[in-house]
Amino acid sequence: MSRPGFAYDFPHSSLLSVGDLNPLDVSMIFERASLHFDANRRKEPRERTLDGLAVVNLFFENSTRTLASFEMAAKRLGADVINFSAGSASISKGESLADTALNLNAMNPDVMVVRHNAAGAAAYFAKVTGAAVVNGGDGAHEHPTQALLDAFTLTRHWGDIGGKRICIIGDILHSRVARSNISLLNLLNAEVRLCGPATLLPADADRWGVTVFHDLDEALEGCDAVMALRMQKERMSGGLIPSDREFAALYGLNHARLDVASPDCLVMHPGPMNRGVEIDGALADDPERAVIMEQAEAGVAIRMAILELITGRASNQRYVDDGTGDGA
Ligand code: CP
């Protein structure tokens, strides 16, 4: 979906699942995001590549990072942005999801970013409307832009993720972040470990191309990065752990638990974070270990890249074919 004179031949007009991406797609996203990340850090204004486009953020579930970073990403690139939340949308008056989707699409937005508590909601939006849709998190299913920003953060530290050992800890069962990360890290040839109590791990997790652990010390052995997940109690139908205190004692990350990991082990968390439960506050704030704020920073750059690429607006003078055969 590239325009003449534009560089990136990105083959997707929506982003619903990490499973739709191949390594070349990911490298295009990361290359573009890298330019934006550095420019954002230097507070340089960006080329208004999304000028004239409208991005609708439709969030039926709460969000801090995803909503703010999509809005910031779109505005930095010159798009018009309209935000809807569940409370302000007419779905609260009984309108169906399909009617909401069709009515918004009738206004001809260029991209709809959808977050919903039902798995498959973003794909349903795309199917009903035929519009460009980005999945901003659908139930316990997927959160593709989160996985991309997580992997992008790791590549900024390591260059290549291939062969690195990464452990995801905690409530894997209800985590769309875990599912998208597992797909993407496998695609990038990392070694993925999962660790948590049996009640918070899907029964078929050992068929996901990962190694499953229930003992945190064993799981952390030699890890290059660890990702703590919060307990997603809003998706639990019953008590799956005895108490937060017991979970923290067995699976909570802190400096001492990382003694068995690689000396340079990076500590990640997608947020929102429950300090003292899945991660100790001192570790979360340790600038030598934690890259949690860098993940939030990368979220804007990744979402800038995604919005440009799916709309065919990613331009890069270095890659524009000017007819001389050697680029610009
Ligand atoms: N990581 C993440 O999706 O955070 P929000 O729920 O704040 O968007």
Image (cartoon, grey):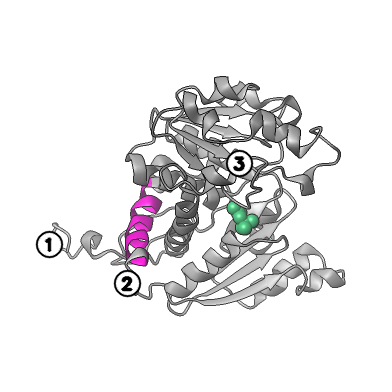
Q: Which residue was labeled with disc 2?
A: 44
Three-letter amino acid code at disc 1? Thr
Give the prevailing secondary structure in the magenta stretch: helix
Neighbour class for label 2 at 10 Å: few (<14), some, many (≥20)?
few
SS for tag 2? loop
Number of numbered tags placed on the structure image? 3
Q: Is residue 116 above or below residue 156?
A: below
- Numbered tag placed on residue 279 in the rendering: 3
Task: Give percent across and percent down for residue 59.
Answer: 68, 64
| Residue 76, image quadrant | bottom left
Indicate which quadrant contains ligand 1: bottom right
Whether residue 130 appears in this view of the structure is: no
Magenta range: 27-40
How far apart are the alpha carbons under marks 2 and 1? 30 Å
Give the mark nearer the N terminus: 2 vs 1.
Answer: 2
Secondary structure beneath label 3: loop
Label 3 is placed on what type of residue? Ile
Distance CA(mark 3)–CA(mark 2): 34 Å
